[in-house]
Amino acid sequence: MAALIGLEPVSAESGSVVFALTPGEHLYNPLGVVHGGALATLLDTALGCAVLSVLPKGRSYTTVELHINFVAPVTLSTGRVVCNAVVLHAGGRMATAEAKLRDVNGKLYAHATTTCFILAAAASPP
């Protein structure tokens, strides 16, 4: 999915992940702006990877809630956008994170939060 849309991993450290996207017309909706689904994928990917970055080895997660506010349209003229995601809470069963999508000048295009369910470690095969 990331390759289809053109998501670019930029950086990752414990609790914080950055992804980028350069808009293209292939991502446009019928209104002539980047489809919200493409931006949602960018936000969800960054949020999930931020959560994954704080989990112990062998643990994983699943998104149970994703809330996005789109505050400005993204087009070719916007240029590259960068999504910064940060973990707010990581407990034994749930984690939350927030992300902001900005252009290179710092203009905000979207912000999002997620709640993730932390999955138990998979049993090792005998």
Image: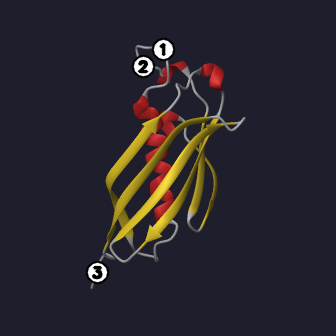
Mark in the foreground, 2 or 3: 2
Which percent across, then down, holds residue 26?
A: 49, 21
Mark in the foreground, 1 or 3: 1
In the rendered image, which residue does mark 1 sit on? 32
Answer with the quarter of the image where residue 85 lies.
Answer: bottom right
In the rendered image, which residue does mark 3 sit on? 125
Taking 60 as reference, is 2 left or right?
Answer: right
Question: Is residue 51 among the parts visible in the rendering?
Answer: yes
Give the distance between the C-alpha atoms of the residues marked 1 and 3, in whole angstroms. 51 Å
Q: Amino acid at mark 3?
A: Pro
24 above or below 92? Answer: above
In the rendered image, which residue does mark 2 sit on? 29
Local crowd at mark 1 within 10 Å, few (<14), some, or many (≥20)? few
Marks 2/1 in contact by CB < 8 Å: the verdict is yes
- Under tag 2, what secondary structure? loop
Taking 22 as reference, is 2 left or right?
Answer: left
67 above or below 12? Answer: above
Tell me the residue at 44%/71% (across/down): 90
Local crowd at mark 3 within 10 Å, few (<14), some, or many (≥20)? few
Tell me the residue at 33%/77% (across/down): 121
Q: Which mark is residue 79?
A: none
